[in-house]
Image (cartoon, helix red, strand yellow):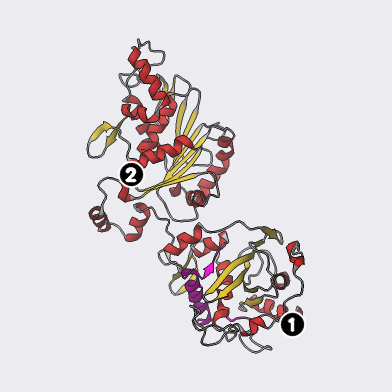
Amino acid sequence: MCPVRYDDYVKKPDLEIEYTREQVEEIIKCKNDFFYFCKYITIVETDTGRTKFIPRDYQVELFDLILNNRFVVAKMARQSGKTTALAAFIVWSAVFNSDKFIGIASNKAVSARDFLSRVQLIYEELPVWLKPGVTTYNVYSMELENGTRIEVSATTKNAFRGRSMWILCLDELAHVSSTMSSEFWNSNYHAITASQEAKIIVLSTPNGMFNLFWQLYVDAERGANSFKCHEVRYNRVPGRDDKWKAEQLKNMSAEQFAQEQNIEFLGSSSTVISADVLKFIMVGYKDPIAKELDSNLLIYEKPQQGSIYIIGADVAKGTGQNFSAAQVLKVKSLKPVRLEQVATYNCNTVDIYKFSEILVKIGYYYNSAFLLIENNAEGAGVVNRVWWDLEYMNMYNSGGKTKDLGIRATKTTKPRAILLMKKLIEDYSLLIVDKTTAEQLSDFAEQNGKFGCINLNDDLVSALYWSCHILTTEWLPETFEFDGNAVDDDAWGILTDVEPEEDWSWLSDQRIIL
């Protein structure tokens, strides 16, 4: 290990200093008040070079969150001073606390080294009487004579493994691969949270959806985890106005600007559901109230007496690849149309014989719900078993009862069902509460004339648009309008022909077991 090069900026340990009374008072003030300590911090600005650090208003907000909470996640525009702000907090924490370990992980090793260089610059510019000496000082770590150590690393599964961290800082987490970030998180999270004083601070610009940073942030927004969230868009940074935005858009796409400067979580630009609606969906999901059938059936609302339900289904082989999926929708009203997702079934190992039984069981559970099943490929076996063997008469058939059982996915029926689903969701006429469905919708796009998810399975989406398909069938009057203006009280026709059970009280405790 290379010896430390001590100079006027890198202080030797055990250096004898004669402190004045004023210096002692300043040390005490700095220790007790981070914002007072900031008056001694020097940073490097791109335009002005070395200058005193005066926190911007959004940095003050971030510091308040960090000081008063254990877990903080912030999405911040590029070049908004997030690394500088966090470096300042780390120096203050290290200088005034003994025998602690602070870990800084960034998306790349070079970024991690750059982060530490900013920490070291702030340390070096402190007055000699305000800072401890150092015993280790290199591009990957520094240790103060008070025993507190700061280390940096790329975000890998082995980074900081086995270390009891006091503060973990994750920089640009959204730009770490999903596999790597998950392995890192699983390796370190429990070791960090074992201490009631430990903090986790996550700062990043967004990089699409479905990564660990996105999950932490959207869960923080909806109060589903312990993190407090903070955001800084480009227009909060001094000098970044409409003129600056126009100049940036000359050199980057609107999508790139939206993600990196307006800090929006963006999926593909060709997603079927609009970005604004996707944002609403991704923070609006709920936890199921019950899980049945080996936790493949998620129930968000149990059936209510007198309510009408629709089930859409998509069938797979059951060989561990694609999923057999079902969506259960409750008809809340027709003036205007209001549908709500109340249950989902999703499994990639159930065979078509068993799936047929499951669909019928769920159908009876939800008030003899109306069942719409795609009959392409494996679906043909399911619709035949549901209709002939299990004799479930509330299954929709696109043709006669002896042929064309179920729904045939064609170049006409499938796009029509998808566009209807899109309209219902974007009009907020169809409420989505299931997280996996929400994720698939956020990845569901049209590419080269074909619809499907880009990175995820799309089976729940398929089941969802087939459940919506009922609104386009002959089961409803041709004059039906989606705003409800032409809907009569008996508009559902066949949907109201089924006599309800006399007593549904058994449903409250009923478990679905096949």
Of the pair 155 and 165, the residue shown nearer to us: 165
Q: Which residues are magenta?
A: 405-432
| Residue 93 falls in image quadrant | top left
Q: Secondary structure at mark 1?
A: helix
- Locate residue 37, reporting x and y percent: 36, 27
Q: Is residue 194 magenta?
A: no
Task: Kindly identify which numbered label has been placed on residue 80.
Answer: 2
Q: Secondary structure at mark 2?
A: loop
- Locate residue 508, reporting x and y percent: 73, 63
Q: Which callout, 1 or 2, points at the residue further toward the start of the chain?
A: 2
- Locate residue 334, reporting x and y percent: 55, 77
| Residue 297 falls in image quadrant | bottom right
Neighbourhood count class around disc 1 (C-alpha, 10 Å): few under 14, some 14–19, many 20 upward: few
Q: CA distance from mark 1 to mark 2?
A: 65 Å
The residue tagged 1 is 388
Q: Is residue 421 magenta?
A: yes
Q: Nearer the viewer, mark 1 or mark 2?
A: 2
Residue at (55% x, 45% y) in the render: 183
- Does any portion of residue 409 appear in the rendered image? no
Neighbourhood count class around disc 2 (C-alpha, 10 Å): few under 14, some 14–19, many 20 upward: many
**Vertical comparison of 275 with 218: above or below:** below
Instruction: Name the amino acid, label 1.
Output: Trp
Please state, as top left, top right, bottom left or bottom right, where the N terminus lies in the image.
top left
Residue at (35% x, 48% y) in the render: 77
